[in-house]
Image (cartoon, rainbow, N blue to C red):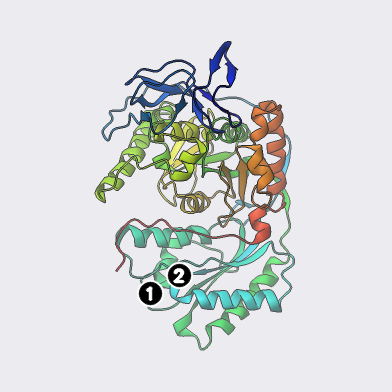
């Protein structure tokens, strides 16, 4: 097959791979065209792997999409470890990151004051505290003062309650926050005293707690505490930090036919580059590994990591089945409109964000990174939940590739990378970097060099589009019953 770089018309003759093909129907930009006849039942190949099989004969020059191919995926798959580890090597880069070194040695790329509610019941009070802090105090030395509201913390059971507590505890530990006020209610399931056990250890100078039912005026008390925190952070300065301290999340959303050709491979090149500097990347969106999971499994550094990757995939399939939901209900309507036909096609493009790196660890939801290199993380494909999950595991920044565009941002800098130039030019208020030049006139290594410069500038304090607009949120993974 070939991918249309622009809208093509029926009757046009295209030259691909030394052969001439006459189009027998219109082919939209990003969509697939058959370069030879494909028989019914025959596998359709992209990226060197089958992305499904033809459900009817497909003529040379015909459009290939949902109407004539179907996934090959099934529920039960037996996996075998066949190591194919061939990481790319880049020379050491002597540049440094101007970051904030925390007492535990972690590095933040932002210095922000966060108010974190333990339960949704005090969201309004938390917002009122932040509003007064911004209006009454000089916070010009801080990158942001922000409350991260959520609807959880009470009436939850099992994994949902655990996820909420672990997610909020991970936020307390995040190095992009220079100071944190945790605001509780007093009668919620997520009691502050129990929540503190989840946090473990914290810096009492920088992390403070208020229980609203235990003080006369929680807003006044919160403003008082934040005034102290603002002053404490006033002396924080950026200092040179090694590239090895960078932890970067890898995420794609709103994919199109170019995602696996431009933006995702570019992010994969960056992942390999950063790992060569001693840094860390995390790949998530487990349902969007289905159909390409063996590529990652064969890159596991050991049998143990292979087994844990198998569990990562099978447990997520089991999660879908436990709620009687289809495992392969993907791609989304937006993906299909952009040219993605089957889950295999989407996944084969998705995993390219992990480059050629060896998989060194598999993380449960909210687990912190402990091993440098390429990590896999248990989280769904949902854009905000997955991006938040990457940050909760310690990523200071998320690289978010998109062929459709989106304005959102997680609670850490979330760089939007367009798969095509048309989107970049159309959505200047959303997109931070254009990978579309990869199919125009720019060589991969030249584009990578510009991309690294952009990422390091962001790490050094340059604001992304969503940061400038203030679109920053957290979303906690919910799996089960709400009382």
Which of 334 and 110 lies nearest the eye of the viewer? Answer: 334
| 461 sits left or right of 64 in the view | right
Where does the image place residue 389, in percent across and percent down from the top left? 48, 51
* Disc 1 element: loop
Identity of the residue drawn at 40% across and 18% down: 38
Which of 375 and 414 lies nearest the eye of the viewer? Answer: 414
| 41 sits left or right of 350 in the view | left
Q: Residues within 10 Å of mark 1 (few under 14, many from 20)?
A: some
Identity of the residue drawn at 66% across and 27% down: 444
State the quadrant of the C terminus.
bottom left
- The answer to which quarter of the image holds residue 203 is bottom right
Identity of the residue drawn at 71% across and 61% down: 236
Question: With respect to residue 161, does 340 lie above or below?
Answer: above
Q: Residues within 10 Å of mark 2 (few under 14, many from 20)?
A: many
Q: Can residue 255 be seen in this snapshot?
A: yes
Where does the image place residue 114, in percent across and percent down from the top left? 58, 66
Where does the image place residue 2, in percent across and percent down from the top left? 53, 23
- The answer to which quarter of the image holds residue 300 is top left
Q: Can residue 432 be seen in this snapshot?
A: no
Question: With respect to residue 357, does 371 lie above or below?
Answer: below
| 241 sits left or right of 182 in the view | right
**Alpha-carbon span between mark 2 and mark 1:** 8 Å
Where does the image place residue 207, in percent across and percent down from the top left? 56, 68
Lower sequence index among marks 2 and 1: 2
Circle 2 is placed at which residue position?
118
| 186 sits left or right of 116 in the view | left
- The answer to which quarter of the image holds residue 403 is top right
- Kindly give the residue lying farthest to the front in the view shown: 11
Identity of the residue drawn at 46% across and 53% down: 385
Circle 1 is placed at which residue position?
188
- Kindly give the residue lying farthest to the top in the view shown: 18
Determine contact: label 2, label 1, CB under 8 Å.
Answer: yes
């Amino acid at each position: 097959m070939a991918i249309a770089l622009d809208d093509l018309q029926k009757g046009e003759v295209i030259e691909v791979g030394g052969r001439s093909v006459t189009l027998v129907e219109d082919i939209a930009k990003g969509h697939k065209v058959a370069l030879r006849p494909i028989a019914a039942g025959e596998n359709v190949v992209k990226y060197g792997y089958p992305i499904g099989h033809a459900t009817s004969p497909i003529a040379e020059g015909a459009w290939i999409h949902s109407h004539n191919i179907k996934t090959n995926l099934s529920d039960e798959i037996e996996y075998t470890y066949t190591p194919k580890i061939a990481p790319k090597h880049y020379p050491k880069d002597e540049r440094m990151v101007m970051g904030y070194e925390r007492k535990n040695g972690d590095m933040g790329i932002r210095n922000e004051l966060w108010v974190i509610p333990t339960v949704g019941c005090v969201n309004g009070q938390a917002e009122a505290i932040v509003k007064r802090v911004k209006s009454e105090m000089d916070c010009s030395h801080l990158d942001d003062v922000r409350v991260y509201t959520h609807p959880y913390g009470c009436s939850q059971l099992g994994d949902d309650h655990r996820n909420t507590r672990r997610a909020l505890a991970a936020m307390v530990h995040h190095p992009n926050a220079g100071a944190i006020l945790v605001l509780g209610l007093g009668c919620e399931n997520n009691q502050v005293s129990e929540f503190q056990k989840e946090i473990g250890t914290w810096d009492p100078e920088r992390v403070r707690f208020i229980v609203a039912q235990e003080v006369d005026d929680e807003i006044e008390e919160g403003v008082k505490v934040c005034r102290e925190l603002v002053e404490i952070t006033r002396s924080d300065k950026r200092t040179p930090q090694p590239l090895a301290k960078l932890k970067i999340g890898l995420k794609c959303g709103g994919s199109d036919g170019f995602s696996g050709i431009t933006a995702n491979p570019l992010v994969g090149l960056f992942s390999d580059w950063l790992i060569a500097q001693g840094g860390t990347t995390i790949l998530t969106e487990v349902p969007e590994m289905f159909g390409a999971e063996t590529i990652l499994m064969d890159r596991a550094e050991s049998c143990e990591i292979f087994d844990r990757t198998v569990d990562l995939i099978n447990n997520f399939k089991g999660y879908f089945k436990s709620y009687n939901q289809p495992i392969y209900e993907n791609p989304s309507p937006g993906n299909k409109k952009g040219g993605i036909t089957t889950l295999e096609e989407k996944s084969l493009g998705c995993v390219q964000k992990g480059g050629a790196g060896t998989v060194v660890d598999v993380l449960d939801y909210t687990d912190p990174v402990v091993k440098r290199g390429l990590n896999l993380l248990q989280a769904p494909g949902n854009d905000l939940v997955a991006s938040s999950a990457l940050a909760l595991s310690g990523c200071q920044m998320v690289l978010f590739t998109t062929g459709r565009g989106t304005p959102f941002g997680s609670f850490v800098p979330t760089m939007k990378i367009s798969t095509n130039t048309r989107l970049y030019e159309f959505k200047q208020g959303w997109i931070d970097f254009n990978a579309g030049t990869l199919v125009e006139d720019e060589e991969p290594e030249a584009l990578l060099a510009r991309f690294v410069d952009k990422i390091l500038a962001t790490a050094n304090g340059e604001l992304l589009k969503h940061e400038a607009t203030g679109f920053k949120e957290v979303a906690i993974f919910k799996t089960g019953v709400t009382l």
